[in-house]
Amino acid sequence: MPYKAPSPVHLLLRFCNHLYKVQIRQGDTRPPASRVESPSGTARPTENLAASAVSTLEKTDRNCSLGKDQKMTENRPNIVVIAGPTASGKTSVGVRLGQRFQGEIVSADSVQIYRYLDVGSAKPTPDERASVPHHMIDIRDPDQEFSAGDYMREAREIIDKIGRAGRVPLVVGGTGLYIKALLGGIVELPLANRALRRELREQERTRGEGTLFGKLMRVDPEIARRIHPQNVPRIVRALEVYEVTGTKLSDIQRRHSFRDRPFRHLFVCLDPGREILYERIDNRVDSMIERGLIEEVNQLLQRGYGRDLKSMQSLGYRHAAMVVAGETDRDEAIRLMKRDTRRYAKRQLTWFRSESDALWFDPRDSDKIESVVENFLGR
């Protein structure tokens, strides 16, 4: 029998009933109309529970929209996205949901795609990968190029296979551009111009670090604000697009609007709070060093993978490479790695907060997350 999505009224009743049960478990026996639980778990008064519930449901239902100029269909596959900043607990939440809902995880991490980059990319453990099938991990060598367009095409193929097998695709990761491309399509951009890229990189080398970022700030400040000043590959690509087309990348993206919507999706974002997040980041960095990140980078360099590769410029890898090259000591590299990872996490939070259909949760609120996913899947 074909699946029929629950009606908005049915969803509303289920949502109100869930909130009331939460109140009872917490010892609050007031009628539902007097209290609502916020996603962060703190109480907030409301004059109308139904209005608040409808607002939340409407936000979730936007995930099902094809856009104003497209007609909604019922045969699009359901996918659940688990996103958030680094060290926010995405992997553990994804594994738990995969076990609970017979799902398979499609990684959305721009470093985990590379073979041999294991410690510094925080890949799922062997036990986690054995408990739930994982995809889009270890699919490229460190010197192979891989774009958001490549991710979109390959991940969509995998998601199609997962759906046809009767299982739930769970997209788990913190690379916002990958997720945006997957859900909304990719902007058609000119092919790589190798000569121009070499010329731009030579400018950075001869004129000093930050030259290209400064140039991008002048020609396309909107895009520049989304890119880390040391992320030379992305800076080069943005400048390349501008030089080849004469149009700013931000303008091209705005015209595209990412309206290609092949999935009906639920967008779950995790945020444990700044203090806890930063503590997790610090602990993760210490753990990576103890587990041999510097030794891993040394082996990669001995294999012939240079420091200028996009993969080797990733967080942790560029810091460990500085130690291997004798440019800094271990303690200073750890300090810089923690600092830069916190800054990266802030940029990730900014990116995901711009997603209007994202629903935010503390990763420890596993019951709430599972309840929302269960309602979305109609189970």
Image: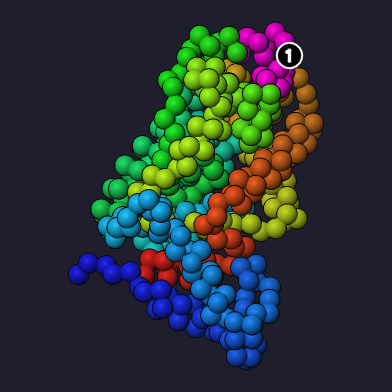
- Residue at 57% across / 81% down in the picture? 49
Report the label total.
1
Report helix, strand or loop for mark 1. loop
Q: Is residue 207 magenta?
A: yes
The vertical placement of 306 against 263, above or below, is: above
Instruction: Please give the range of residues in magenta.
Output: 201-216
Closer to the camera in the image, 310 or 188: 188
User: Which image quadrant for residue 29?
Assistant: bottom right
Answer left or right for 273 relative to 109. Answer: right
The vertical placement of 60 against 42, above or below, is: above
Closer to the camera in the image, 25 or 324: 25
User: Which image quadrant for residue 137?
Assistant: top left
> How many C-alpha atoms fall within 10 Å of the one at disc 1: few (<14), some, or many (≥20)?
few
Q: Main secondary structure of the magenta part?
A: helix
Horizontal and vertical percent for residue 344?
67, 40
User: Which image quadrant for residue 250?
Assistant: top right
Answer left or right for 170 relative to 209. Answer: left
The residue most toward the left is 1
Closer to the camera in the image, 71 or 211: 71
| Residue 62 seen in this snapshot | yes
Q: Which residue is mark 1?
A: 208
- Residue at 68% across / 79% down in the picture? 45
Q: Is residue 189 magenta?
A: no
For the N terminus, the quadrant is: bottom left
- Residue at 48% across / 12% down in the picture? 194
What's under tag 1, amino acid-wise?
Gly
Answer left or right for 82 relative to 188. Answer: right
Horizontal and vertical percent for residue 59?
51, 63
For the C terminus, the quadrant is: bottom left
Horizontal and vertical percent for residue 213?
68, 23
Horizontal and vertical percent for residue 74?
29, 60
